[in-house]
Image (cartoon, grey):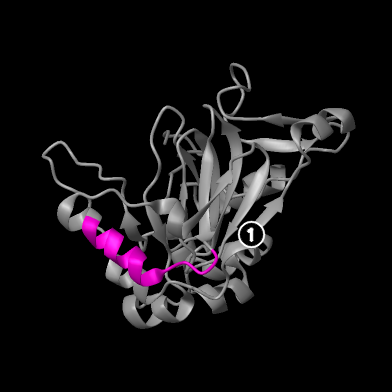
Amino acid sequence: MGDGPEAEVELPFQLLCVLHPAEFLGAAVHARYGTSFPIRYDYLDTIDGGNLSLHLHPREEYMRTRFGRPYTQHETYYVTAVAGDDPRVYLGLQQDADIDLMRKQVEGAIERGEEMDVERFVRSHPSEEGRLYMIPAGTPHASGAGNLVLEVSATPYLYSLRFYDWLRKDARGNSRPLPYDHGFDDLDTRRQGADADRARRGRLLPAPAARRATGARGQVPGQLGPGRPHISRRRRDRSPPPPPLLSIPRVSSASPQRRRELAAEA
């Protein structure tokens, strides 16, 4: 952009990882993940919306043997805001969940439009601002209506093995494709009930009343005021702001000699 000596060009970050993996990823990360930046961040907004589909992400061996990817998508939900009377997060199997019956209900929803009794098989947790939910691959989960979730996960985001989409139809009356056979093939049944809760739920901040007592504060997208970046940030008032997660050098179209001169001037 521009036509002077400091003209710049914008490049996709993933392209920089491919062209300069050691510089942008580091040797250890490059050796483990190739040219793929292994962490991704996105917002899942179901405020004034509906439940996300019930799904899981394949575990590492299944991801490697069936889909040819070297690593899988473990993830977390960090709830930044909630709305409505009873927002929920669906996460983990119920104790002694009947997987055969679950499959029958999934197939009944797809083939005959029968409603699935999700909470008979999957645990439902109250959604609370500031709570972190840990979601290992192979775990059935969904963010319910009324949540603004910061999803932090590994990068292979294309492989969501879905069981149920709440009988929704598109504009043409078609149901969403649900690759439930893959989901049941790789469903992790080792942790169920309260054991799943202990393994998968954590708290990133105290409850709201405790945060007020200790001087902590929270900011969520859309509430930062004009001219401020719309990011979610949570920290204690007396702590310095955290450093940026990643600083990306700007790539200049100037000649190598001019770039050296600019670097010396800086």
Q: Which residues are magenta?
A: 95-108
Question: Residue at point 11% right, 39% down?
Answer: 172
Disc 1 packing (10 Å; few <14; some 14–19; many ≥20): some
Quarter of the image that includes the N terminus? top left
In this rendering, the answer to whether 37 lies above or below 238 is below
Image coordinates of residue 266 in percent, x first then y, are 71, 42
Image coordinates of residue 113 in percent, x first then y, are 19, 49
- Where is mark 1, residue-wise? 197
Membership of 96 in magenta stretch? yes
186 vs 236, left or right, is left
Question: Residue at point 75% right, 32% down?
Answer: 208
Membership of 219 in magenta stretch? no
For residue 244, what is the image quadrant? top right
In this rendering, the answer to whether 195 lies above or below 217 is below
Question: Residue at point 73% right, 47% down?
Answer: 204
Farthest top residue? 226
Closer-to-camera residue (217/225): 217
Closer-to-camera residue (118/249): 118
